[in-house]
Amino acid sequence: MWEDGWIQVKVPLPFSLRWVNSYVLPEQDGYTVIDPGLHTEEAVAAWDEVMSRFGFGYGDIRQIVLTHQHPDHYGLAGYFQKRSGAPVYLTAQAHAYTQRMWGEGGTLAGELAALFREHGMPAELTHSIEQNLESFKPLVSPQPQVTYIQAGQTMAFGGLEWSLIDAPGHARGALVFYNAGRKIALCGDQVMPRITPNVSVVPGEDADPLASFMDSLAGLESLGVKLAFPGHRDPFDGFAKRTAELRQHHERRLAQMLEQLYEPHNGFELCELHFGERLRTNPHNLRFAMAETLAHLYYLEKRGVIARSESENDIVYRRV
Ligand SMILES: [Zn+2]
């Protein structure tokens, strides 16, 4: 329990992250649910247990608010909507990703595999990544009817007024919800204790997601958040210290990559130098590692300190 009867629900996940936080905020006549979780049997059972413990049901849910579109946050939104009839709020940019990834005729998984192949990843690995992405479809079904919200607006829930702040880099269209009176933030995956949010290149989206992420952290740091409610792990203070640590983490990695690029390397080679070959058997984490490596390479390339050369087989980077 936090702030005025808020309930932090640790919704189980079948990955190393172990759980995603949903927050249930009491309203006059029901509840607002933030990020209900991934649609698995275990997650539904966990929700049944929470609802019976706190004495509410799906019919008491007045709205479902999503910080971003990743399956561990978005997956149960449609299931909750079906049972509650409540609106699901998400930004248009985030919703576009869900349709490109899991919608009818969505091509994003294939585009991602093609991008990774261009950057040197062997075809058998890109194939396992595509299969892994395919396996998420039932975990985000049924998909919700979405009502769009956008950065710059305000929203009221949990008895408080929230500013919606654009928080790109981890997911395009992600929002941080900030209440200036109490200096508290619902920050999704943008800033978390002990976990470094994945920053990924997504084909057809932001061409420099790492720069967007770093800029976003700088902006969030200036808010003076006193208590942050993250998507994973537990609510935490020391928000500005954490955003500074995250920026330093990426600056160190950029410096390491620059060092490594005195020798020419393709993206996949650099991915394995940083994250290790053991990821070959874990397509889920390999995808994060590869897309994050590319985010760093694109960042350095945009700043003119490395350059690419394209061969028949792959794209190779080196320091200029
Ligand atoms: Zn996420």
Image (cartoon, rainbow, N blue to C red):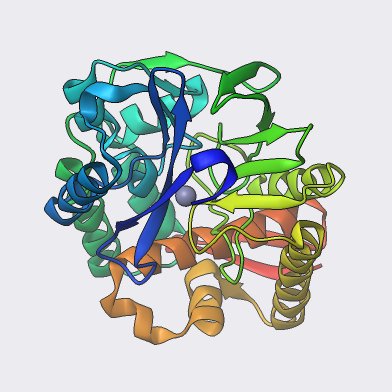
Query: Is residue 103 something one can see in this rendering?
Result: no
Above-or-below relation of 144 to 15: above
Task: Give the camera-side residue of 45 and 203.
Answer: 45
Task: Give the camera-side residue of 24 and 300.
Answer: 24
Query: Is residue 21 something one can see in this rendering?
Result: yes
Q: In this rendering, would 317 be left or right of 270?
A: right
Q: In this rendering, would 220 be left or right of 11?
A: right
Q: Name the residue located 57 percent from the left edge and 55 percent from the top edge.
A: 199
Q: From the top left corner, tell me how far across and down residue 59 is, in percent.
A: 22, 22
Above-or-below relation of 136 to 132: above
Q: In this rendering, would 305 be left or right of 195?
A: right
Q: In this rendering, would 5 be left or right of 219?
A: left
Q: From the top left corner, tell me how far across and down residue 92 is, in percent.
A: 49, 20
Quarter where residue 23 is shown: top left
Quarter of the figure with the C terminus:
bottom right
Q: From the top left corner, tell me how far across and down residue 102 is, in percent.
A: 26, 35
Q: Name the residue located 20 percent from the left edge and 51 percent from the top edge.
A: 49
Q: Name the residue located 40 percent from the left edge and 85 percent from the top edge.
A: 277
